[in-house]
Image (cartoon, coloured by chain):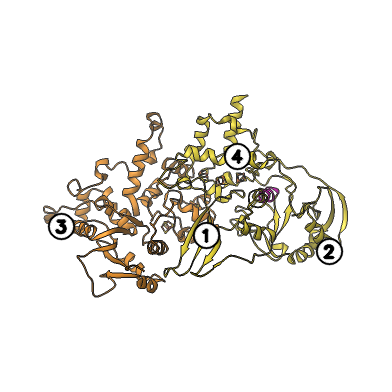
Amino acid sequence: MNRLQHSSDGLALGKDQMHRLLDALKEYGELIGPVHDGQWLRMQTFSKYEELCLKGISWFTSKEYFFPQRQVLFQFDGHSLTRQEEFPKRVLFGLRLCDLNAIAVNDKLFLEQEPQHREYKGYREGLTLVGLWCDEVQDKYCFCSSMELEHFYDICLYDRGDYYHIKAGSEKGQEILEKLQLLPNGPYEKEFPTGEMKLSTKDIAKFFDKNQVWQKGAKECLSCGDCTTLCPTCMCFDVQDEVEVDLTKGFRIQKWDSCMYKDFTLVAGGHVYRNTRLNRFKHRIYHKLVYFPQKFERYMCTGCGRCIRGCPTKIDWIGLVNEMEGETQ
Amino acid sequence: MSEKLKVGIFGITGCMGCQLNILYQKELLQILDAIDLRAFPVGKEVNLENEEFDIIFLEGVVVNRRDLEDLQRYRKMTKKLVAIGACATDGCVPAIKNFMNNKNVERSVYKESELESMHSLDPRPIDDFVKVDHYIYGCPMDKMEFLQFMKQTLLGKEFKVAAKPICYECNLRERGCLLEQGIECMGPVTFGNCSVMCPLKNYPCVGCRGPYPDANFEAYFSMLEDKGVDKETIARHMNRFAGVKFARLIQKEKEGKGEEEKEDENSCMDLFCHVAKDRLKKGDASCWGGN
Ligand code: SF4
Ligand code: SF4
Ligand code: SF4
Ligand code: SF4
Ligand code: SF4
């Protein structure tokens, strides 16, 4: 993504004119956006603006669209190996800043260091990202304003009542908007919304010995892995070989995994590195706020809140961190 | 290619659903091509017994002495014994009797005059008596897992399933959690690798694949209590397919806790604990018996 210098200047598009934008976007691939099924909000294919639900944050993430649950790495048939050569083109529409930044996080790991992840690259290059700015937090679990997010999108929409203020964030976004010939709308900027949930510090490495507080979270934890499956930045996977019964064909497959399971760190010989729930619970948060920034110079968590919203026992790790910070003051 | 695997498929007390599920396997013909099926009394006429098998798949739960003798004979006949289905792996419905008074159960079926000579026993999963090499869970046995077993075994690999709860697959299928809707799902405490047909059909998981070994029962029970789910409902679900194994794991979890923690312990944890611990002990035939 060739990003542009951030500017607050944008164009105006009436909400009754959204079909024009969507028609232009269709050239860039299949439209995927937040659709409500009466119970759950999820990212799925749509064709008309009216089908979308632009209130609230999707329960599930869009990571399936660039980091599929089951990714075939190669197929073999006894004579030759084949790999996936074609990747879909898709427009992710109405992503919130947290989910856009989650893609930036995935890029750090899979694209911006060698070796690049071949299949991730394939999916990622087919993506066009259209963001929707949050005027307010979507629910009580959002804490994006604590996470130092950046402007990361091809296009971003700001709701201005009966029209959108539209900004381009990349050369591709600019190219799309130029085709629409919209009226300039001057500068417009909006702060990150802040809700009830705030992370008082991200420097949690200093709490390494505060196990009594961490234990409160671990005690409630079911090791169900909902948090990591729903997290847009969790990108851990397992690699397995699968075969046909007659053993003539098979494939190597990459599948989502989770550090919340004991078997995640099971190695040959039967040793498990993170045997206790406490270690696993701590590791997840440490990966987001300590290990990843050490290597990639940005936080891994983007504050979308899904790991708390979707946790069956609603373990509030933000509250735990704040409690530890409070104790050290 | 080396010789084909010598396979036998047998059953002790059970409904035959798991054995039938092998016949319903889409890849059945391919599987039959790849193995030497020496015995399958449910599925074929000529069956060789009393010889060496590489693998025996065994359905059913031990409910009487004859089952036990058969089980021990099958164990001696094979290099690998694979428990198929909830009866063999966890005891399933017959094992509910472990949590009831045997005399009362007998009285509900037999005449008073017959009770004198009655010695009914506590039904148990087969690994209470013999070593089991592999487990294929589910009621009935999960067809996909059976196929995974066949493929890995034919490839010469040791069959292994990473321990994850049902929630893992459920989330992959983007079901949206039933617990969030206040419905008592057993996903977080049930062994995964299932096709999650229950949550996908709007029905909670009732634990037919037995316990997830890393389940956190205390947290699970108190979460359900917070959500106002009736304890009896949960006890019934847990008891239905794998009561013995759930109860043992819950007792183990309790024992692992310090005295302090025991005090404020959730009463739900005692669901199964009205059953004396020694009754649930793994048995050889001698200590195996009712009250
Ligand atoms: S750790 Fe939680 S809040 Fe952070 S990105 Fe993942 S799901 Fe969202
Ligand atoms: S280690 Fe855990 S927290 Fe980190 S990306 Fe993997 S699953 Fe997510
Ligand atoms: S979703 Fe909650 S209970 Fe489940 S593993 Fe994550 S923190 Fe633990
Ligand atoms: S519906 Fe059941 S199996 Fe699915 S995530 Fe919720 S608790 Fe787990
Ligand atoms: S979802 Fe639960 S009850 Fe249903 S088949 Fe799977 S393990 Fe059994």
Total marks drawn?
A: 4
Determine whether B58 is above or below B214 in the image. Answer: below
Q: Which residue is mark 4?
A: A291
Classify mark 4: residues with Cα within 10 Å, few (<14), some (14-19) or many (20+).
Answer: some
Camera-near label (2 vs 1) is: 1
User: Where in the image, quadrant-wise, is ligand 1 located?
Assistant: top right
Which span of residues is magenta-colored?
A97-104
Instruction: Evaluate whether residue B185 shows in this view.
Output: no
**Closer-to-camera residue (B74/A180):** B74
| Amino acid beneath label 1 | Ile
Q: Which residue is mark 3?
A: B111
| Amino acid beneath label 3 | Lys
- What is the chain identity of the residue bearing mark 2? A
Q: CA distance from mark 4 to mark 1?
A: 27 Å
Disc number for residue A179: 2
Classify mark 1: residues with Cα within 10 Å, few (<14), some (14-19) or many (20+).
Answer: some
Residue at far top of view:
A329
- What is the chain identity of the residue bearing mark 1? A
Q: Are marks 2 and 1 in contact (CB under 8 Å)?
A: no
The answer to whether marks 4 and 2 sit on the same chain is yes
Q: Are marks 2 and 3 in contact (CB under 8 Å)?
A: no
| Amino acid beneath label 4 | Tyr
SS label for mark 3: loop
Camera-near label (2 vs 3) is: 2
Q: Which residue is mark 1?
A: A253
- Say which chain is yellow: A
